[in-house]
Image (cartoon, rainbow, N blue to C red):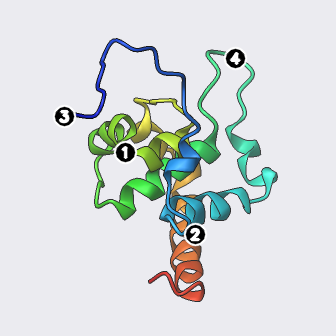
């Protein structure tokens, strides 16, 4: 006897947060990036063109990609379709502009500072 299995059944969208373990690294990344003041992102605002992905979300997926040993934009982009924690952090978005965002001179210092703060927080919380 087998458990019931049907690929044709409609499945409702699931809140991915419930699929993550209690001390998942995604929660630490989320807390760190959400602690950054809004003023740090003011320079990224544009009044023309297509709306950009929010810098908070982009920082979250880059930092999470780094924790998964994914350092190239393409690998991070692939994780967005495969990894539950990445899907949760991006809230279902799959940006292909990761390298463009990461190479922006405005983000370079912010990303470096985030990485240092993130490591310090992980040590404080005894996660590493």
In the displayed structure, 13 sits above or below 115; it is above
In the displayed structure, 78 sits above or below 67; it is above
Whole-number angstrom distance, CA of label 1 to CA of label 4: 33 Å
Quick one: 88 or 19, which is closer to the camera?
Answer: 19
- Residue 84: x and y in percent read 43, 45
Which mark is on residue 91?
none
Decide if residue 9 is on the left or right side of residue 107.
Answer: left
- Residue 125: x and y in percent read 59, 84
Q: Would you name the residue on which mark 2 appears?
A: 113
Residue 53 seen: yes
In the displayed structure, 110 sits above or below 50; it is below
Which mark is on residue 1?
3
The residue depicted at 27 percent of the width and 44 percent of the height is 75
At mark 3, the secondary structure is: loop
At mark 1, the secondary structure is: loop
Of marks 1 and 3, the one in the foreground: 3
Quick one: 46 or 20, which is closer to the camera?
Answer: 20
Q: Would you name the residue on which mark 4 appears?
A: 48
Of marks 4 and 3, the one in the foreground: 3
At mark 2, the secondary structure is: helix
The residue depicted at 53 percent of the width and 60 percent of the height is 111
Q: Of callouts 2 and 4, which one flags the residue occurring earlier in the amino acid sequence? A: 4
Q: Are marks 2 and 4 in contact (CB under 8 Å)?
A: no
Q: Are marks 1 and 3 in contact (CB under 8 Å)?
A: no
- Residue 18: x and y in percent read 57, 49
Q: Would you name the residue on which mark 1 appears?
A: 83
Whole-number angstrom distance, CA of label 1 to CA of label 3: 31 Å
Whole-number angstrom distance, CA of label 4 to CA of label 3: 60 Å
Whole-number angstrom distance, CA of label 1 to CA of label 2: 25 Å
């Amino acid at each position: 006897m087998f458990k019931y299995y049907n690929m044709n059944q409609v499945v409702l969208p699931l809140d991915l947060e419930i699929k993550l373990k209690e001390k998942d690294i995604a929660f630490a990344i989320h807390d760190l990036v959400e602690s950054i003041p809004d003023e740090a992102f003011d320079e990224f605002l544009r009044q023309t063109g297509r709306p950009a992905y929010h810098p908070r979300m982009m920082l979250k997926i880059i930092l999470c990609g780094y924790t998964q040993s994914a350092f190239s934009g393409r690998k991070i982009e692939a994780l967005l379709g495969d990894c539950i924690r990445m899907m949760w952090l991006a809230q279902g978005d799959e940006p292909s502009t990761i390298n463009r965002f990461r190479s922006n001179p405005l983000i370079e210092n912010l990303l470096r500072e985030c990485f240092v703060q993130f490591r310090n927080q992980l040590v404080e919380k005894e996660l590493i």
